[in-house]
Image (cartoon, coloured by chain):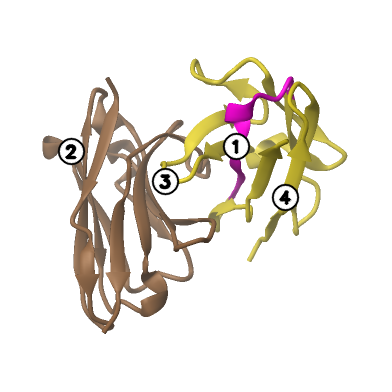
């Protein structure tokens, strides 16, 4: 069973830049894992931010971007805003296994 | 407007059964794969399973934690998705979300639109 790992928590200053990462126990994360990133605020459903490594939805703020970095999927937030404080989850696809979420990163803007 | 609305959650005893529904609107439901995702209290997201579309024979897949106990089905004529949960355990307590698959690739598990969730509590 694949395990997807994320930083449990990160802190960023308002206006600052932070990178969240998403690793796989099976090896390097590639575009073939179709990495996704979701944002979830307390009491709300998750919202999809990034799909297929780096693609944004129409509702995704421009300050969010996705990439592959050092064998992991990465979500970079440039110019953090107070409203970006949330839990962030990545999702990787594994053929024959299904979708596997990371444990989530609690991002604090402080 | 694309919308997913879950219903059917509630309190059930261990060993019991429950059927969740998800009503879809604003898009061509029959074209899409559909997923169920759950979140236990204070915990992260867990993919539960999916049903593919008619073009892929409505095949289903499940997470190991629910395989053999949960069944996903759909009724394209009613734009509805279902999750039949049997032999429920206390660890199945969670908010259950339905989500729309973005692409109809066989081993692609990403989803773009989420419902608001329905709460299932398994307790005696």
- Identify which residue, A56 or B40, lies in the foreground: B40
- Of tags 2 and 4, the one toward the viewer is 4
- Check the image and report above or below for B50 versus B104: below
Residue that badge 4 annotates: A9
The answer to whether dots 3 and 4 both sit on one chain is: yes
Alpha-carbon distance for marks 2 and 4?
A: 41 Å
Residue that badge 1 annotates: A36
Name which residue lies at 58% across and 54% down. A100
Contact check, label 1 and label 3, Cβ < 8 Å: no
Q: Position of residue A10 (x, y in %)?
A: 75, 44
Q: Is residue A25 visible?
A: yes
Q: Residue furthest right?
A: A70
- Classify mark 2: helix, strand or loop: helix
Q: Residues within 10 Å of mark 4 (few under 14, many from 20)?
A: few
Contact check, label 1 and label 4, Cβ < 8 Å: no
- Identify which residue, B96 or A29, lies in the foreground: B96
Marked residue nearer the N-terminal end (1 or 4):
4
Residue A72 occupies quadrant? top right
- Counting the numbered discs, the total is 4
Alpha-carbon distance for marks 1 and 4?
A: 18 Å
Report whether A74 appears left or right of A84.
Answer: right
Mark 3 belongs to chain: A
- Of tags 1 and 4, the one toward the viewer is 4
Magenta residues?
A78-94
Mark 2 belongs to chain: B
Query: What letter labels the chain drawn in brown?
Result: B
Is residue A80 covered in magenta?
yes
Q: According to the rendering, which colour does chain A have?
A: yellow
- Quadrant placement of the C terminus of chain B: bottom left
Q: Residue furthest front?
A: A110
Residue that badge 3 annotates: A43
């Amino acid at each position: 069973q694949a395990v997807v790992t994320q930083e449990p928590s990160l802190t960023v200053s308002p206006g600052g830049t932070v990178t969240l990462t998403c690793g796989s126990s099976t090896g390097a994360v590639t575009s073939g894992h179709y990495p996704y990133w979701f944002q979830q605020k307390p009491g709300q459903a998750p919202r999809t931010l990034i799909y297929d490594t780096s693609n944004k939805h129409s509702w995704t703020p421009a300050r969010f971007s996705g990439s592959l970095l050092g064998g992991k999927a990465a979500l970079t937030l440039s110019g953090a805003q107070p409203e970006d404080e949330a839990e962030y989850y990545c999702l990787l696809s594994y053929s024959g296994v299904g979708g596997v979420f990371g444990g989530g990163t609690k991002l604090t803007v402080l | 407007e694309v919308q997913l609305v879950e219903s059917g959650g509630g309190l059930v005893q261990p060993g019991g059964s429950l059927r969740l529904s998800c009503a879809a609107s604003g898009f061509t439901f029959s074209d899409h794969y559909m997923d169920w995702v759950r979140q236990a209290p204070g915990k992260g997201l867990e993919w539960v399973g999916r049903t593919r579309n008619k073009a892929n024979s409505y095949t289903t897949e499940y997470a190991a934690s629910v395989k053999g106990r949960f069944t996903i089905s759909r009724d394209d004529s009613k734009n509805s998705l279902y999750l039949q949960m049997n032999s429920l355990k206390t660890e199945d307590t969670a908010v259950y979300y339905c989500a729309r698959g973005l692409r109809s690739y066989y081993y692609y598990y990403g989803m773009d639109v989420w419902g608001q969730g329905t709460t299932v509590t398994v307790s005696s």
